[in-house]
């Protein structure tokens, strides 16, 4: 059974809101990525056949931190009965209901074309302070899959960045997890 810190609990409620963009900003190990990956799993389970992209700047870091760490951790704690099928070559995990969770980097031209050739119900930019605004804008254009049961939603997480960083200007509302 999963439990949340007070900061995570407030952020969890925010993530369930009807807004299109949500950014979680907070210190390292405060549980931002865990919460957003959990929300993506909930959304993928709710809307069968839906697609969800989890993107970092570097593809290697995305696979190492999300596919091999956060995602298995979230499944173990929050969805112990759900079996994910890994399609490493194609860069995604398949859920039993046909939904798919892609994990990739925005630095890898071949892969990025493949990933961004699809439309998604969720786009999550992980560690967004490392992602250039131009790449973020391109990724957000792929937030376009129409599904039954869930609204399109972009998620962003980052460690606090400078006031002029695009995440301080372009994503509302934000939730600080200090
Ligand atoms: N509610 C929870 N229950 C169980 N484990 C959790 C929970 N929240 C977070 N964790 C685990 O705690 C660790 C830190 O969480 P997470 O990676 O989400 O933090 P973060 O805020 O994204 O950190 P960073 O800024 O370094 O990326 C991870 O191993 C994660 O799986
Ligand atoms: Mg994180």
Image (tube, rainbow, N blue to C red):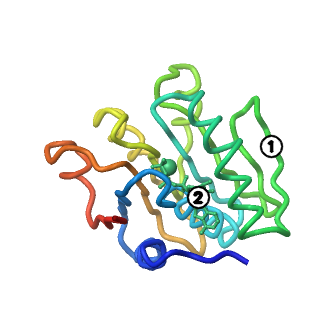
Give the x, y percent position of residue 129. 33, 40
Give the left or right position of residue 153, taking residue 161 as reference: right
Q: Is residue 27 above or below residue 62?
A: below
Give the x, y percent position of residue 178. 34, 64
Say whether mark 2 is within 8 Å of ligand 1.
yes
Q: Is residue 129 above or below residue 97?
A: above
Give the x, y percent position of residue 38. 61, 64
Furthest residue in direction left, as rendered: 164
Residue tagged by mark 1?
86
**Residue visible at 62% across and 77% down in the picture:** 3
Q: CA distance from mark 2 to mark 1?
A: 16 Å
Helix, strand or loop at label 2? It is: helix
Helix, strand or loop at label 1? It is: strand
Please name whichever residue, 92 or 178, is drawn nearer the observer in this view of the structure.
178
Give the x, y percent position of residue 48. 71, 66
Residue 37: assigned label: 2
Say whether mark 1 is within 8 Å of ligand 1.
no
**Residue visible at 68% across and 43% down in the picture:** 67
Give the left or right position of residue 154, taking residue 88 as reference: left
Please name whichever residue, 149 or 57, is drawn nearer the observer in this view of the structure.
57
């Amino acid at each position: 059974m999963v439990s949340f810190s007070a900061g995570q609990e407030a952020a969890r409620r925010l993530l369930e809101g009807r807004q299109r963009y949500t950014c979680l900003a907070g210190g390292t190990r405060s549980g931002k990525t865990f919460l957003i990956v959990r929300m993506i799993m909930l959304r993928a389970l709710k809307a069968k056949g839906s697609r969800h992209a989890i993107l970092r700047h570097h593809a290697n870091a995305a696979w190492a931190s999300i596919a091999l760490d956060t995602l298995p951790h979230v499944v173990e704690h929050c969805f112990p009965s759900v079996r994910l099928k890994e399609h490493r070559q194609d860069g995604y995990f398949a859920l039993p209901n046909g939904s798919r969770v892609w994990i990739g980097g925005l630095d890898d031209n071949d892969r990025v074309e493949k990933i961004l050739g699809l439309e998604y119900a969720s786009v999550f930019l992980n560690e967004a302070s490392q992602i250039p605004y131009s790449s973020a804008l391109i990724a957000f254009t792929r937030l376009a899959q129409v599904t039954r049961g869930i609204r399109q939603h972009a998620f962003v997480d980052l460690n606090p960045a400078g006031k002029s960083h695009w995440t301080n200007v372009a994503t509302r509302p934000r939730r600080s997890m200090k």
